[in-house]
Amino acid sequence: MSDAQAAGSSIHIVEVGPRDGLQNEKRIIPASDKIALIDRLSATGLRHIEATSFVSPRWIPQLADAAEVFSGIRKMPGVSYPVLVPNEQGYARARAVGAGEIAVFAAASEAFSQRNINASISESMARIAPVIQQAKADGVRVRGYVSTVLGCPYQGTVAVADVVRVASLLHTLGCYEISLGDTIGVGTPNQARAMLAAVAQDVPMAALAVHFHDTRGQALANILACLEQGVRTIDASVAGTGGCPYAHGASGNVATEDVLYMLHGMGFATGVDLDALAVTGRWLSALLGRENGSKVGRALAGRAEGR
Ligand code: HMG
Ligand code: MG
């Protein structure tokens, strides 16, 4: 793809740091810090920030404070703050604090579905369907995730046909967008391209997003392959935080700073201020007491310090 082809096109970034980024942290992060993170992200030009998760606190103790966090954030006009919801109980909790957009999730791998949500794929769909139906009746937008689209930590290979089936079902049920997740970061560009092309035969490309974890350093290459296929929505996590506690070996999501650097360098517009985001990535890394997972974030820090 040439810079000229990219120029003028815009890419929508879905920031998943506060949810996917923090759900795997061992040390409990105070709600006030999560709120500060989201408020900082809101000021960078991001338009979509996944704020938290109303899953079972027994399963994800780190996000047990979902209601407090969601209630505490400053909701910027024009910014959407979706929250993850696994079932009707989660939906009721999300609605009680006024969530206006939710994200539901299912897997393309049976084995992962069992480990992550204690249900088969078809059971999970039966659980999600009434949630989507209720959300639509309430005027709440629903995004859908398909996990393990390029491989599973428990069963290994995942058939592309299974990814297509689950993505297509979520779309038919009423999800306005389906995010395709390489949960454990095993995919490579040709696989990513083929998977996306297969799904796009059933779900319009404009309703698809990609969600890469950078476990093996393949995320940007995979994103580029998917951009060339026509995808225009990308999930990413500030400072490359993240992972799923039920996906052994899953490391951070692709860093938002790295994605922005690549996109802006190619001539795509995102509306996000990379420098401001990098400052927040540095702040978050210090807060978590870990090295910044964004290469671009580290390089910009070096520049700021005159290195
Ligand atoms: P379960 O244990 O089979 O369900 O969990 P249950 O209905 O028997 O409930 C067990 C207990 O949890 C009960 O409490 C329920 O009330 C409670 P008890 O009576 O024992 O005291 N409970 C809840 N409490 C609060 N909110 C709720 C809720 N639901 C039940 N919503 C369940 C089934 C789905 C709930 C559980 O397995 C779960 O929450 N799993 C979530 C796991 C998770 O969050 N994984 C990470 C997100 S997915 C991901 O990261 C991938 C993604 O990023 C894309 C990618 O990278 O591929 C999206
Ligand atoms: Mg993820």
Image: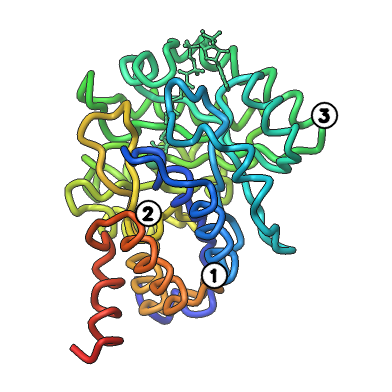
The reply, left or right, for residue 54 in relation to residue 218 is: right
Q: Quadrant of the N terminus?
A: bottom left
User: Callout 1: helix, strand or loop?
Assistant: loop
86 lies above or below 218: above
Q: Residue at x 30, y 45 (%)?
A: 192
Category of crowding for the residue at label 3, using alpha-carbon neighbours closer than 10 angstroms: few (below 14), some (14–19), many (at least 20):
few
Which residue lies under the disc numbered 3? Answer: 137
Q: Position of residue 31 (x, y in %)?
A: 53, 46
Q: Amino acid at mark 1?
A: Ser
- Do residues under tags 2 and 1 come within 8 Å of each other at their CB atoms? no
Say which label, 3 or 2, has the lower sequence index: 3
Which residue lies under the disc numbered 1? Answer: 10
Snapshot quadrant of residue 91: top right
The reply, left or right, for residue 131 in relation to residue 183 is: right
Disc 3 to disc 1, C-alpha distance: 31 Å
Q: Amino acid at mark 3?
A: Ala
Say which label, 2 or 1, has the lower sequence index: 1
Which residue lies under the disc numbered 2? Answer: 226
User: Callout 2: helix, strand or loop?
Assistant: helix
Looking at the picture, tell me which residue is in the foreground, 273 or 130: 273
Can see residue 195? no
Disc assigned to residue 255? none
Q: Quadrant of the C terminus?
A: bottom left
Callout in the foreground (3, 2): 3
Q: Residue at x 58, y 62 (%)?
A: 39
Snapshot quadrant of residue 187: top left
Q: Position of residue 191 (x, y in %)?
A: 26, 42
- Do residues under tags 3 and 1 come within 8 Å of each other at their CB atoms? no
